[in-house]
Image (spheres, rainbow, N blue to C red):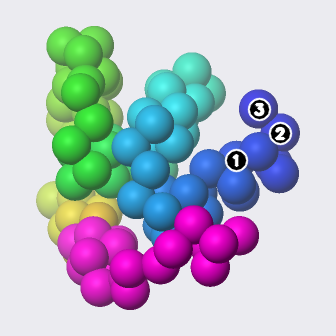
């Protein structure tokens, strides 16, 4: 996945609360072997009620098990901030989004 596509997915998650985009980003992170960003994307997916597989949960647990308490705190705070931003987005029509 190229950077432009990734940026578009990030925007879709942040602005459109798109669960499929969140899942795509998390799957990309897993495939790339990411840790911190993968865990953050997992939390985004959970927040957007994405149906996750046992493998998705297992990857997040494995990543969390090797991070420090401080790293987990930072990631949790960032996930909460992102969730709150998504929840406070004004309801936009499809035309306004594009």
Residue under the point 62% across and 79% down = 96
Mark 1 and mark 2 residues within 8 Å of each other at the beta carbon: yes
Residue under the point 70% across and 55% down = 8
Depth check, front residue: 57 or 13: 13
- What residue is disc 3 on? 1
Mark 1 and mark 3 residues within 8 Å of each other at the beta carbon: yes
- What residue is disc 1 on? 6
The residues tagged by marks 1 and 2 sit, at their Cα atoms, a distance apart of 6 Å
Query: What is the crowding at mark 3: few (fewer than 14 residues within 10 Å), some, or many (at least 20)?
Result: few
Q: Residue 71's x, y, as percent?
A: 29, 61
Residue 33 appears anywhere in the view: no
Magenta stretch, overall SS: helix
The residues tagged by marks 1 and 3 sit, at their Cα atoms, a distance apart of 7 Å
Mark 2 and mark 3 residues within 8 Å of each other at the beta carbon: yes
**Magenta stretch containing residue 89, yes or no?**
yes
Q: Which residues are magenta?
A: 80-98
Q: Secondary structure at mark 2?
A: loop
Q: Residue 39's x, y, as percent?
A: 34, 45
Query: What is the crowding at mark 2: few (fewer than 14 residues within 10 Å), some, or many (at least 20)?
Result: few
Q: Secondary structure at mark 3?
A: loop
On the rendered structure, is 98 left or right of 17?
Answer: right
The residues tagged by marks 2 and 3 sit, at their Cα atoms, a distance apart of 4 Å
- What residue is disc 2 on? 2
């Amino acid at each position: 996945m190229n950077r432009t596509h990734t940026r578009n997915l990030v925007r879709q998650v942040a602005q459109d609360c798109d669960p499929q985009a969140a899942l795509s980003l998390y799957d990309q992170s897993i495939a790339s072997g990411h840790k911190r960003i993968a865990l953050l994307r997992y939390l985004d997916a959970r927040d957007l009620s994405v149906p996750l597989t046992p493998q998705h949960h297992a990857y997040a647990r494995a990543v969390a098990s090797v991070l420090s308490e401080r790293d987990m705190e930072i990631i949790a705070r960032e996930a909460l901030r992102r969730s709150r931003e998504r929840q406070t987005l004004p309801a936009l029509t499809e035309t306004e989004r594009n």
